[in-house]
Amino acid sequence: MEVIKPKTNYAKDSEEVNFFFEKYQDAQQDMELEVENMDVDVETVHPSRYIKKLRAVANREDDKIIFELDDIQAFEDDGNVTNGLVRKIMTNTWHYIELIYRICDKLMPIPINPIGHMDDVLDVIMQHRKDKDQNRAPEDRTRFPAALTRRYSLYLKPLKSEKTLAIREVNGSNVGHLVTVKGIITRVSDVKPFLLVAGYSCEMCGDEVFQEVTKKNITPLVICPSEKCQKNNVKGKLYMQTRTCKFIPFQEVKMQELTEQVPVGHIPRSMTIFLHGSLTRSMNPGDIVSVSGIFQATPHHGYRGTTSLLTDVYLEGQYISQLKKQYNKMITTPEISEKIRELAQDRDIYEKLSRSIAPEIYGHEDVKKALLLLLVGGVSKSMGDGMKIRGDLNICLMGDPGVAKSQLLKYISKVAPRGVYTTGRGSSGVGLTASVTRDPVTDEMILEGGALVLADNGICCIDEFDKMEDGDRTAIHEVMEQQTISISKAGITTTLNARTSILAAANPLYGRYNIKKSPTQNINLPAALLSRFDILFLILDKHNVEDDTKLAEHVAHVHQHGKHPEMESDLLDVQMIRHYVAEARSKRPVVPPDVSSYMVSSYVQMRQEQADAMANKKAHTYTSARSLLAVIRLSQALARVHLRDEVMRQDNH
């Protein structure tokens, strides 16, 4: 029988990775070396990029090493290593990570700084053991596992050219491979300590025994395996010593497919992701991310712990890339900053930005201006006694069918860094706020956030708002004003943050707006809910030959060419809008005394006009103190659009 030998030569691959660590210089380093004198020892004066990383780890300046596959791919393209090494790493990732770990341990330089009192317990314990072992024979010295002595974590960064997969595209052929998956984070567990190395001490001989943990489950050692106990013919009992164990942070994350990745008639699939070390706490519910990791399979434990023929799959996270960054985390280049300054000098910046919102949709200039103010928002304030005044705007679009309300909502949910789109009929009160579920890992009762929690510090778009049940709609009342969700169920009593703007779209009571009925009869929403909206738009589909012709030509052009007509040459793209909004949200405009007096007098006049209308039974709206707060928020948002630090009088018109 012929024995098939594996083609992989791990010894040769180890030598090549070692050579890569010692020799690789990035493009910037290569340019520096070309212009300098090359008579000196280059490796001493100009160490490679990864040797620098190892020095930072040895001196405790960093605790992670990111091994970029693009670097070794460039090294491979230059003919320095064998072709196919990158592909081997991507198809047998776990084994090559251990190989790279051993090379890092081998090349790790001696730290410059000696151990001090600020070092952790394991450093001090290992130093004491080394001092104690100096007078012992080599075979009697304490042997520390490599995982215990390492003070760093190794992560692989995938190739930039690597295809990003949907969750349903990952199958059995990818087990053990490095894959990149894109989706939205729906649930994040608490960070728990994960046992990496277990430390024991023997009650008879006093020796320390270490056990590396390679699986999710561990069988603790009971009998001491040391030579002392074997020579004395005794079975020393081992006791786990927590201080000598090594723990790393562990977090479980649930990712779900994006809406555009789900085929028609299917439900979204989800995947479990395990994060270790510095990758924990890097994602929150509602984030849209691409995660690179090792696709692993583990036995499924069924009833009473029995092992099933099925297997559970998960992704061992290696690299995380945020696809929609928060405003405060967006990276602004000098070119973008200069462009923002130029735009801020334009007097028509308000109109230019509003025209750039959903240019494929014809008309609705005033609605687009309001949506721009929704993105920018007002200034949130916290009082000394703990009371908070929201700065986020809430807008309701009420109108006839076919006026592009849903398209505007979907556009805003994509532009906002954290945007969630849902419908009234398909949403329950629990689905909007939070539900109580049982954690499959810890078996504890946990809270799983709904759409409003996922949209924290973002925008929640609710379509078909009028189709919601009254009981489910009341769950939004607290969110729209206090911006919190109070939960008291299943033994969990807490308050969740829901600092979100609500953008709702609804149809009138009779399907289309009935001009013979009053606005109150057409809207058919409770006053307690309407007062929480800063702006309520009535969008009517009126017949006009000129407007109908322009609208039809616009729609025909979009369907024919796949883009909006080139009516404006100065429209801004989505990325530029995000950068400008991020800059605007960094401003905190204040209301000067003269503008404050104008607001007060205008509010008093509005209240008087409403009182007169109620006396004549012609009142269609209700003006309250919330109306004054809405005016303040809108004026602050308009001042932010112009990047001003003060609210001006024209901002209130």
Image (cartoon, rainbow, N blue to C red):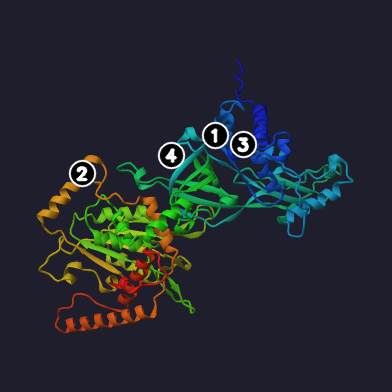
- Residues at marks 4 and 2 touching, judged by CB atoms closer than 8 Å: no
- Residue at the disc numbered 4: 165
- Label 4 CA crowd tier, 10 Å (few <14, some 14–19, many 20+): some
Q: CA distance from mark 1 to mark 2?
A: 46 Å
Q: Is residue 444 left or right of residue 512?
A: right
- Residue at the disc numbered 3: 30
Q: Earlier in the sequence, mark 4 or mark 2?
A: 4
Q: Is residue 230 above or below residue 441?
A: above
Amino acid, disc 4: Leu
Q: CA distance from mark 2 to mark 3?
A: 51 Å
- Residue at the disc numbered 2: 557
- Residue at the disc numbered 1: 90
Helix, strand or loop for disc 1: helix
Helix, strand or loop for disc 2: helix
Helix, strand or loop for disc 3: helix
- Residues at marks 4 and 1 touching, judged by CB atoms closer than 8 Å: no
Is the C terminus in the top left, top right, bottom left or bottom right quadrant?
A: bottom left
Image point (51%, 55%), residue name: 189
- Which label sits in the foreground, 1 or 3? 3
Q: Is residue 257 above or below residue 348?
A: above
Residue sitting farthest toward the top = 1
Q: Earlier in the sequence, mark 1 or mark 3?
A: 3
Amino acid, disc 3: Asp
Amino acid, disc 1: Met
Image point (18%, 71%), residue name: 520
Q: Earlier in the sequence, mark 4 or mark 3?
A: 3
Q: Is residue 427 visible?
A: no
- Which label sits in the foreground, 4 or 2? 2
- Residues at marks 2 and 3 touching, judged by CB atoms closer than 8 Å: no
Q: Earlier in the sequence, mark 1 or mark 2?
A: 1
Image point (22%, 63%), residue name: 398
